[in-house]
Amino acid sequence: MGHSKPNRRATALIVEDDPMQRDMICLLLEESDVDVIECESAEAAELVLERAAGSLVLMMTDVQLAGNMDGVELAHIARKYNPDIGVIVTSGKPLHQELPDGVQFWAKPWAPLDVIREAERMVHERRHHREG
């Protein structure tokens, strides 16, 4: 009862068609007090972005996804809906497409701790941006 403002948790969108990888990323983020929305295709993620892009601090997507759209196309869409969202695109193969400005590319395998650090950095940046 002593809180004047509710402490809203940050939300991340994870787009990965491999259930084991998606579960691992989600568990890492949830351990860092980040709420997670999971999608296995870019098309499903686009629907989430249409409804909730403004509340998302981070989207992490694989390049290769189920469906007709890849993660690079999805990164461009995410930036249209929310120019401030942090976006990480990952792949086990070299990237030959151009990413939007500010979007990070992580080659697989990446360290799980990097996901936590990046999520925490983005949450901190977002809170600082809102207060400033």
Image (cartoon, grey):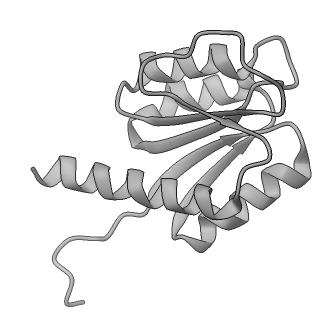
Q: In the figure, is residue 124 to the left or right of 11?
A: left
Q: Which residue is located at x 45 percent, y 21 percent?
A: 79
74 lies above or below 34:
above
Q: In the figure, is residue 97 to the left or right of 131?
A: right
Front-most of 60 and 98? 98
109 lies above or below 16:
below
125 lies above or below 85:
below
Q: Which residue is located at x 78 percent, y 41 percent?
A: 108
Q: Could you tell me how many numbered marks the image carries?
A: 0
Residue farthest toward the bottom in the current orientation of the protein:
2
Front-most of 117 and 58? 117
Q: Locate residue 8, reporting x and y percent.
A: 36, 64
112 lies above or below 76:
below
Q: Locate residue 29, reporting x and y percent.
A: 61, 62
Q: Which residue is located at x 54 percent, y 70 percent?
A: 32
Q: Which residue is located at x 46 percent, y 33 percent?
A: 53
The quadrant of the image that shows the N terminus is bottom left
Q: Locate residue 70, reporting x and y percent.
A: 75, 17
Q: In the figure, is residue 113 to the left or right of 132?
A: right
Q: Locate residue 4, reporting x and y percent.
A: 16, 77
Q: In the figure, is residue 43 to the left or right of 67?
A: left
Picture quarter containing residue 69? top right
Residue farthest toward the left in the current orientation of the protein:
132
Picture quarter containing residue 83? top left
